Image (cartoon, rainbow, N blue to C red):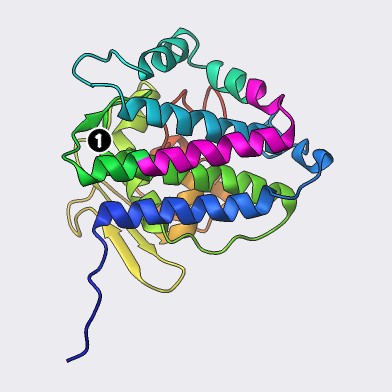
């Protein structure tokens, strides 16, 4: 009988997708001249350099989180959280601007080093008995941490791709990003001082290769979202406005969610566009 290699466990598959997404973005920015690094991106006030600096900072913060016991909160992540909590609406911009001030070659090396270290840290944690880890929003499990890093790398890579006028290959982690967008629904409501619905939404998406991905009940859903998975990812990462997406929202609550969906920690869209 033919031998079939075992499928990777879900966490390993997510980590592999994160690596692949970082590789795609690295290929986009490696070799850019200084003028291109200084090009403005769709995020107001952010250049390509700001995008990479933000990823370097968040990858460093994630490694610090993995090294900090969540029971005490006392460790390398402590200072990251303290500085963020002191200025939640401005600290992300400050750290991005600080990083973007470095020469492009130095900044790229910083990001490559931080993402390689985070990959080692995440895989080492996966080989053990991971629990939960501190973050700027609610604590997260290991796979959620990996998915969050995948989502951010993909989202900021979208900004860079839009700036350079290129189209990236389909991410192998697209379903993971969709899932994160679904499970952060209640966070998005509370982040906007709204009470989440008591029932679930039905989210019915089709992948770029024609697969159907669904979340929530067939019946008794309090709202429905339908359309392309890619468009849903662009929505929950706030990379496109609702009117530019081929998504259908059924029900008042689903339409409300469309305006506030947010798959990442930080201030709501009413305060600042997704970073």
Residue 150 vertical placement versus 52 (above, below): below
Residue 117: in magenta span: yes
Q: Which residue is outermost to the right?
A: 35
Q: Position of residue 259 (x, y in %)?
A: 47, 37
Q: Would residue 142 be visible to someone looking at this image?
A: yes
Which of the 4 image quadrants contains residue 65? top left
Q: Quadrant of the C terminus?
A: top right
Q: Give yes or no for residue 182 being in the magenta stretch.
A: no
Name which residue lies at 44% across and 38% down: 117
> Where 17 falls versus 258 (above or below)?
below
Q: Identify the residue shown where x is 48% and y is 15%.
A: 88
Label 1: which residue?
197
Range of magenta residues: 97-120
16, 138: nearer the viewer: 16
**What is the x, y in percent for residue 43?**
65, 34
Q: Secondary structure at mark 1?
A: loop
- Image-based side of 266 in relation to 146, left or right: right
Extreme-bottom residue of the structure = 1
Q: Is residue 84 above or below residue 16?
A: above
- For label 1, the crowd category at 10 Å Cα-Cα, with few meaning under 14, some 14 to 19 and many 20 or more, is some
* Residue 183 seen anywhere in this rendered image of the structure: no
Within the image, what quadrant is residue 5 found in?
Answer: bottom left
Residue 41 appears left or right of 249: right
Q: Residue at x 64, y 61 (%)?
A: 167
Q: Residue lying at the far top in this picture: please name it.
A: 86
């Amino acid at each position: 009988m033919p031998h079939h290699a075992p499928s990777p466990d879900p966490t390993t598959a997510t980590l592999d997708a994160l690596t692949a997404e970082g590789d795609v973005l690295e290929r986009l920015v490696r070799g850019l001249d200084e003028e291109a690094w200084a090009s403005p991106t769709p995020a107001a006030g952010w250049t390509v350099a700001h995008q990479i600096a933000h990823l370097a900072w968040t990858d460093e913060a994630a490694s610090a989180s993995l090294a900090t016991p969540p029971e005490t909160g006392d460790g390398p992540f402590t200072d990251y959280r303290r500085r963020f909590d002191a200025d939640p609406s401005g600290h992300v911009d400050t750290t991005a601007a600080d990083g973007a001030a470095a020469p492009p070659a130095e900044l790229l090396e910083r990001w490559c080093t931080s993402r390689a270290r985070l990959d080692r840290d995440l895989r080492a944690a996966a080989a053990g008995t991971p629990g939960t880890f501190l973050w700027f929003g609610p604590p997260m499990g290991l796979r959620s941490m990996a998915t969050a890093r995948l989502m951010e790398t993909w989202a900021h890579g979208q900004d860079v791709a839009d700036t350079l006028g290129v189209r990236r290959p389909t991410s192998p982690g697209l379903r993971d990003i969709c899932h994160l967008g679904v499970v952060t629904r209640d966070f998005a409501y509370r982040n906007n001082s709204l009470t989440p619905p008591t029932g679930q939404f039905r989210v019915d998406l089709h992948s770029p290769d024609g697969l159907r991905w669904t979340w929530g009940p067939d019946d008794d859903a309090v709202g429905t979202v339908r359309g392309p998975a890619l468009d849903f990812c662009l929505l929950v990462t706030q990379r496109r406005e609702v009117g530019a997406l081929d998504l259908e929202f059924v029900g008042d609550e689903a339409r409300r969610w469309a305006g506030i969906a947010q798959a990442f920690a930080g201030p709501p869209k009413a305060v600042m566009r997704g970073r």
